[in-house]
């Protein structure tokens, strides 16, 4: 036997043991109901906005601000300060540079909470803001929020008119998250609030002298941005002199829209920003704190808080369906590919999961109420009589839980697809109006391995979901996150669109995953939808051979999913676009054998290298294998990196954000990515190892 084959066999054995440890770690952390759920963390802006909301809900009394939530405000302050950078600023992703809007938000919150203007931490933050253009350089949402308290001139903030809801289906040309933010905020904006602040409180020291506050026009005259700025001026005139009857009609309709979308969900849109603005909107509409609708809105918002005695932060939303689908797929692939001894895997340890474990983060909710009950897993780690069927039972519980989350009501997506039968999955515990395409594809992939005891119900569910995905394909052949053909590019020039998420366009990462899911559920590679998807990916490939990743950082993520979609569609590994992608992945590998990419790649519109992470290394390894690479040194070194960095408990450590909320604005750290994707990569490597004994070269 040659040294190369011996090396391959050794690596196969080591990767198999690593995969087995990872599978065990997942079964140890599975909730009794069958799902997995990890922390979802972001930046300090969430804690800063929480403090702002407390000022809104609990105004100063006799000029003094002492809210009943003061202990939570103090915890939020400590959480913010713990992440202050040496230059005094705050970033929007770990190891990233100071970002002006996050720093302005933090400064406001810290000063409001009582830090002295002479405090060294405040002083450094203030200088950091002035060095970067002052508060005038912050984004429009920061300015709008400050204008609610007369801390920034309203006339220099973009207008957000509720009348947009009277413009037919216009709001459905905005992304789902934008319309969920804009409509409650438009109600707040229309009330022209002038909320009080503590005596003597202002932000005048953040205004850079000799710097204007007006929106800057583009060069030239007839540009879309300039036209929108003219329109914004007209809106401000309308706000002063327009017909109040029309405005009141718009407010009532926006209120109805908002109320309808707080049903069958855990908060408006089930994400932090619209949930916060919904509370404010209910307040200005006259809903007292005791009103069931407002009380529920505040309850759901507060559930996003993690306060476990060691940590205090807000999650932007919950991610149980997403986490469960990825985990179940990875575990299922490992069990199917590696074929570990069924007696070597067990589920649960007979003890209630610890509340401080990352996979059970958050405040009270459907999930947390269940945490008090011991897992119903058929026995503890030492109960050998149930070990043989434990994995199957665990996956059955997972399937049953996922099937119970299928959407069966029409939501915003049905405006453009009125005749499509409802199906699909959302991201959170409950968000019936907003199933998303990416989650639906991932759940379908997981259901290949997670099999319910009710096979007929599962088959019918899968059929509906496949049909829904096919109907949600956009005209360009790709798939987006929530909507179809949500691509009116000119809307990105609206003055309040600088959150860089006005639209929900198609993207290679979701398109690749959808193609893989469809093909795994019987859609042939020759199907017109698949061929259009292939063409879309061919046309969207970057000149260097990579693909852009909208929902994960960034080109590594997009490339791995595009390649998996192309493989599922039957594209050969000798195709030029596939070969170019593999060469690109090998060219960006780090010296330690792993891969890493910075969020800065979104700012530069090109790959920017960073230190290796388990999740991004797994993506690159999966991309190489999807492109037909089964023997290269790059592949071997990537697998070795995953083996060597695995911890004894079967998990991995990762300290960076590899998820994307809004490119250049908001990034996410999914705390199960570091474990799910390496397991999937190891499982895939086991598959090619079983079928290919060629030397690693």
Image (cartoon, rainbow, N blue to C red):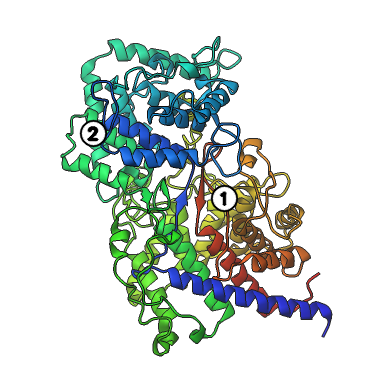
User: Residue at image x 17%, y 34%?
Assistant: 288
Instruction: State the image coordinates of residue 339 (x, y, percent, origin top left).
Output: 56, 82
Q: Earlier in the sequence, mark 1 or mark 2?
A: 2
How far apart marks 1 and 2 lie (CA) works out to 35 Å
- Check contact, mark 1 vs mark 2: CB within 8 A: no
Image quadrant holding the N terminus, namely bottom right
Q: Residue 658: which disc?
A: 1
Classed neighbour count for the residue bearing mark 2: other residues with Cα under 10 Å, few (<14), some (14–19), many (≥20): many
Instruction: State the image coordinates of residue 114 (x, y, percent, origin top left).
Output: 39, 29
Please indicate whether residue 149 sits to the left or right of residue 337 in the image. Answer: left
User: Residue at image x 28%, y 53%?
Assistant: 409
Which residue is disc 2 drawn over? Answer: 282
Classify mark 2: helix, strand or loop: helix
User: Residue at image x 60%, y 35%?
Assistant: 86
Instruction: State the image coordinates of residue 636 (x, y, percent, origin top left).
Output: 73, 68
Please indicate whether residue 50 sits to the left or right of residue 553 in the image. Answer: left
Image quadrant holding the C terminus, namely bottom right
Residue 526 seen in render: no
Residue 572 seen in render: yes
Q: Nearer the viewer, residue 170 or 137?
A: 137
């Amino acid at each position: 036997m040659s040294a190369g084959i011996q090396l391959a066999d050794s690596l196969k054995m080591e990767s198999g043991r690593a995969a087995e440890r990872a599978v065990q770690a997942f079964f140890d952390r599975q909730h009794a109901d069958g799902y997995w759920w990890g922390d979802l963390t972001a930046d300090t802006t969430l804690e800063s906005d929480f403090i702002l909301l407390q000022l809104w809900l609990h105004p100063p009394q006799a000029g003094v601000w002492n809210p009943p939530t003061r202990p939570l405000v103090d915890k939020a302050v400590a959480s913010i300060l713990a992440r202050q950078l040496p230059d005094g600023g705050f970033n929007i992703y770990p190891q990233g540079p100071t970002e002006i809007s996050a720093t302005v938000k933090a400064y406001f919150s810290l000063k409001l909470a009582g830090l002295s203007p002479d405090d060294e931490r405040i002083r450094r933050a203030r200088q950091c803001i002035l060095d970067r253009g002052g508060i005038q350089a912050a984004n429009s949402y920061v300015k709008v929020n400050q204008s609610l308290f007369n801390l920034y001139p309203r006339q220099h903030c973009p207008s957000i008119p509720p009348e947009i809801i009277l413009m037919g289906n216009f709001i459905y040309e905005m992304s789902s998250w934008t319309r969920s933010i804009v409509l409650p905020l438009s109600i707040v904006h229309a009330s022209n609030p002038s909320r009080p602040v503590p005596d003597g409180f202002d932000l005048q020291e953040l205004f850079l002298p000799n710097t204007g506050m007006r929106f800057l026009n583009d060069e030239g005259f007839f540009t879309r941005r300039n036209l929108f700025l003219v329109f914004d001026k007209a809106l401000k005139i309308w706000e002063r002199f327009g017909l109040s009857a029309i405005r009141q009609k718009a407010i009532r309709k926006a209120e109805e829209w908002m109320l309808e979308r707080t049903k069958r969900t855990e908060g408006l849109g089930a994400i932090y920003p619209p949930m916060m603005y919904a509370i404010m909107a209910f307040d200005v509409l006259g809903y007292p704190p005791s009103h069931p609708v407002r009380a529920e809105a505040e309850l759901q918002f507060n559930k996003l808080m993690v306060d476990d005695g060691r940590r205090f932060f807000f999650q932007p939303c919950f991610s149980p369906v997403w986490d469960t689908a990825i985990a179940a797929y990875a575990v299922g692939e490992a069990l199917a590919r590696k074929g570990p001894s069924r007696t070597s895997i067990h589920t649960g340890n007979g003890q209630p999961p610890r509340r401080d474990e990352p996979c059970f983060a958050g405040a009270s909710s459907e999930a947390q109420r269940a945490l008090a009950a011991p897992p119903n897993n058929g026995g503890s780690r030492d109960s050998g009589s149930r070990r043989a069927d434990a994995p199957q039972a665990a996956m059955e519980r997972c399937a049953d839980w996922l099937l119970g989350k299928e959407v069966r009501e029409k939501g915003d997506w049905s405006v453009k697809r009125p005749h499509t039968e409802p199906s699909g999955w959302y991201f959170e515990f409950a968000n019936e109006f907003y199933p998303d395409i990416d989650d639906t594809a991932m759940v379908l992939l997981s259901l290949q391995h997670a099999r319910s005891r009710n096979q007929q119900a599962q088959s019918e569910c899968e059929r509906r979901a496949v049909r829904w995905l096919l109907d949600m394909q956009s005209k360009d052949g790709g798939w987006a996150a929530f909507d179809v053909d949500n691509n009116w590019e000119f809307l990105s020039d609206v003055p309040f669109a600088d959150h860089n998420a006005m639209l929900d366009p198609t993207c290679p990462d979701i398109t690749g995953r959808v193609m893989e899911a469809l093909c795994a559920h019987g859609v042939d590679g020759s199907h017109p939808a698949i061929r259009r998807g292939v063409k879309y990916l061919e046309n969207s490939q970057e000149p260097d051979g990579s693909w852009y990743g909208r929902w994960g950082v960034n080109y590594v993520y997009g490339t791995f999913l595009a390649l998996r979609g192309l493989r599922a569609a039957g594209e050969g590994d000798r195709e030029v676009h596939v070969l170019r992608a593999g060469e690109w992945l090998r060219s960006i590998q780090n010296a330690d054998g792993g891969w890493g990419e910075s969020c800065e790649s979104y700012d530069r519109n090109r790959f920017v290298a960073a230190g290796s992470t388990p999740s991004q290394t797994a993506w690159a390894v999966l991309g190489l294998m999807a492109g037909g690479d089964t023997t290269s040194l790059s592949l071997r070194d990537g697998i070795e990196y995953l083996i060597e960095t695995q911890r004894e408990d079967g998990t991995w450590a990762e300290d960076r954000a590899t998820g994307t909320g809004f490119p250049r604005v908001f990034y996410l750290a999914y705390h199960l990515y570091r474990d799910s994707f390496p397991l999937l990569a190891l499982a895939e490597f086991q598959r090619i190892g079983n079928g290919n004994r060629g030397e690693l070269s």
